[in-house]
Amino acid sequence: MFFASDNAGPVLPEVMNALQEANQGYALGYGNDDLTQAVTAHIREIFEAPDACVYLVPTGTAANALALACLAQPYQTIFCAPMAHIHEDECAAPEFYSGAKLTPVGADDKITPADLKAEIERALERGFQGVRPGAVSISQVTEFGQVYSLDEIKALSDVARAYDLPLHLDGARFANALSALGTTAAEMTWKAGVDAVSFGGTKNGCMGVEAVVLFDASKADEFEARRKRGGHLFSKHRYLAAQMQGYLANDLWLGTAAKANGAAQRLIDGLRAIEGVVFDYTPQANVLFCALPLAAHARLQEAGAVYYALHASDTHQHVRLVCDWATSDAAVDQFLGLVKG
Ligand SMILES: *Cc1c(COP(=O)(O)O)cnc(C)c1O
């Protein structure tokens, strides 16, 4: 019963096989190998964006920080949700790489167009003493397990566009969001006004690879320079590419996201049917936040279930539960049995 995070599960066997297959003979380093060319072409195809620049990096933090550095200047600010991974969980890497300040928008997990507009206006009113608006970043899936609808993304990009600000999408759980919405990568990104994407691989079954997709090809040279200067250009690059190849082949990535979301749905349905369990956010993908009665939490702890315990009240323990592609029905059912008592 392991529900701590979707980076705690095993690597997909197909990804391991792809690594093994790539491990033959010689290939030029730094992305100048056939596998990298094939994989970046495949990602362009998936995004229906033949002119997009695609780069592989080993972590989501690198993807976000390097992408944002290409979108915002040091005297500007990047608008994001208060709990955004770039704001709370990246040790100020986006600030470090871009030099820009981050400005939290609203008080919620999701940014609303009205709050975004108000925060941009506030920055503009500050005049010469304040930072200039630079970019907007949203997480899809959000940190609290919610998903922006296509209309919500469009509404945010309309606001960003009105101020000439690029929109970045942190897709550490991109496939989970895609699966939840039943849409395409193009619809969820550039067709909805997104300019740059951090396309996650690690949490959905890779060992450690994410792609940065920049729809503005004029950023290519800047990104490449920043990636090298930041120490994120993998030398034996074929091993990043091999993971991505195994992950994307035969739409495996969509299947594993559907499995993770399905396991979470089984957990959600089960928890909904148990009296005393309260959801803190509306779970829409593979991450859920809820409050468990204290006795249920104690039973789970006793049985060795692993998950993040957040704050507690006199009656409830608030927890975060995450499923990945390898979460079994048996683990979910055992968990639910212990919550029921
Ligand atoms: C996990 C995650 C990342 C990437 O984190 P790394 O540990 O740097 O790979 C980025 N954004 C979100 C929303 C995440 O959940």
Image (spheres, grey):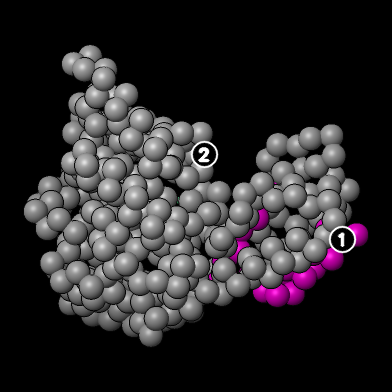
Give x and y (percent) for residue 83.
49, 39
Q: Report how many numbered discs are placed on residues in the image.
A: 2
What residue sits right under mark 2 in the picture?
Answer: 108
Disc sitting over residue 85 in the figure: none
Residue 324 image offset from top left, x and y in percent: 57, 66
Residue 224 vs 103, above or below: the answer is below
Q: The residue tagged with tag 2: helix, strand or loop?
A: loop
Mark 1 sits on what residue? 340
Residue 73 appears anywhere in the view: yes
Q: Nearer the viewer, residue 38 or 228?
A: 38
For the point 75% across and 57% down, which residue is it?
Answer: 305
Q: Position of residue 265 (x, y in %)?
A: 64, 68
- Mark 1: amino acid: Lys
Q: Residue furthest top?
A: 129
State the quadrant of the N terminus.
bottom right
Label 1, ligand 1: CB separation under 8 Å: no
Q: Which residues are magenta?
A: 319-341
Q: Is residue 212 visible?
A: no
Check disc 2: other Cα within 10 Å, few if <14, some if 14-19, many if 20+.
few
User: Residue shown at 47%/45% (left/top)?
Assistant: 110
Whether the magenta-drawn stretch holds residue 332 is answered as yes
> Amino acid type of disc 2?
Asp
Q: Nearer the viewer, residue 166 or 24?
A: 166
Q: CA distance from mark 2 to mark 1?
A: 31 Å
**Corner quadrant of residue 145:** bottom right
Q: Is residue 316 left or right of residue 183?
A: right
Secondary element at tag 1: helix
Q: Residues within 10 Å of mark 1 (few under 14, many from 20)?
A: some
- Comes first in the chain, label 2 or label 1: 2
Q: Nearer the viewer, residue 180 or 260?
A: 180
| x then y, percent, for residue 171 | 39, 57
| Horizontal arrangement in the rendering, residue 156 relative to residue 333 (left or right) | left
